[in-house]
Amino acid sequence: MVVHAVVVAAGKGERMGAALPKPFLPLAGVPLFVHTLRSLTRSTLLQKIVLVIAAEYEPLCRQLLEQHGPLRLPMLLVHGGQERQDSVRLGLAALDPDCDIVVIHDAARPFIEAEIIDASIKSAAEHGGALVAVPARDTIKRVNPQGGVVETVPRHDLWLAQTPQTFRVALIREAHARAHTQGITVTDDVALLEWAGGTVAIVPGDGRNFKLTTPEDVALAEALLKMGTARLHP
Ligand code: CTP
Ligand code: MG
């Protein structure tokens, strides 16, 4: 079974409000995307990584990889697009023709554990698609545009989607191509399989696999690193 990853790192990081996009921000002295790549290389099943970056940051990206490498897996750099969905589609297009399973992961989630990646790969091989997710913990309210509470949404069957989102390559490629042709925009890759009628199984995730989105998240990630509880790998 040939298993490759597409890691998307071509966003602007607007909510972070930093001078550089999120993947290049230092976390305990090492760029965020290098932490993420190191975590992925701990998987026993992954064989190659396609890293999707913004064209203008390719020189910086190469320099940081040189400085903090080498990584245990071969890597290919690809230029991303306007939306995350475009970046994933362009990453999928660059996979080797013999690739069976693709692990799609946000560069902004450095705390992913190898066991969870490998569970998602096995689940995708069996079901077609696999979503790493955690059950919703808080009570969830629907709110009107004026800021008033409308109702409580039962949460027993609600899960919060993370990445990796892992698929048989042919299924997700086909779904992306059809969505692109028909101008369908979604916020994650599993939504494309839902739309295309595929099967996606849940793989229970881990609260530590959060996505760094705002400056507070950087502070939290650094605190986790200092405590040693997040098990970020050297
Ligand atoms: N991403 C990407 N290409 C895009 C947009 C996003 O590759 N056109 C990547 C980001 O780099 C990130 C992941 O998708 O690793 C998740 O997206 P998000 O957290 O929204 O990151 P940004 O889009 O960079 O942040 P923001 O939405 O605050 O601008
Ligand atoms: Mg974004």
Image (tube, rainbow, N blue to C red):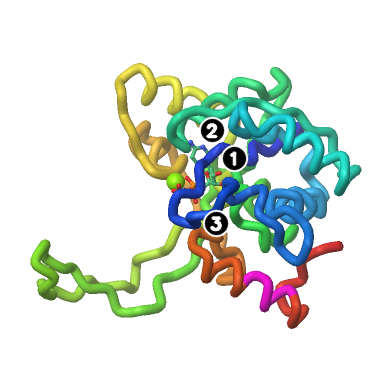
Query: Which label sits in the foreground, 3 or 1?
Result: 1
Closer to the chain start, of discs 1 and 2, is: 1
Cα distance, mark 3 to mark 1? 16 Å
Badge 3 crowding class, 10 Å Cα cut-off, few under 14, some 14 to 19, many 20 or more, is many
Determine which residue is flagged by label 3. Answer: 132
Q: Quadrant of the N terminus?
A: top right
Q: Give the number of the disc on residue 8.
A: 1
| Mark 2: secondary structure | helix
Q: Is residue 125 visible?
A: no
Residue type, numbered disc 2: Val
Residue situated in front as seen by the camera: 2 or 211: 211
> Residue 159, located in which quarter of the rendered image?
bottom left
> Residue 141, located in which quarter of the rendered image?
bottom left
Q: Is residue 140 magenta?
A: no
Q: Position of residue 5 (x, y in %)?
A: 68, 38
Residue situated in front as seen by the camera: 26 or 38: 26
Cα distance, mark 1 to mark 2? 7 Å
Q: Position of residue 44 (x, y in %)?
A: 82, 50
Q: Is residue 178 visible?
A: yes
Badge 1 crowding class, 10 Å Cα cut-off, few under 14, some 14 to 19, many 20 or more, is many
Q: Which residues are magenta?
A: 221-225
Query: Which label sits in the foreground, 2 or 3?
Result: 2
Q: Position of residue 130 (x, y in %)?
A: 54, 48
Q: Are marks 1 and 2 in contact (CB under 8 Å)?
A: yes
For ligand 1, tell me if the residue under mark 1 lies within 8 Å: yes
Closer to the chain start, of discs 2 and 3, is: 2
Residue at image point 55% right, 64% down: 210
Determine which residue is flagged by label 2. Answer: 88
| Mark 3: secondary structure | strand
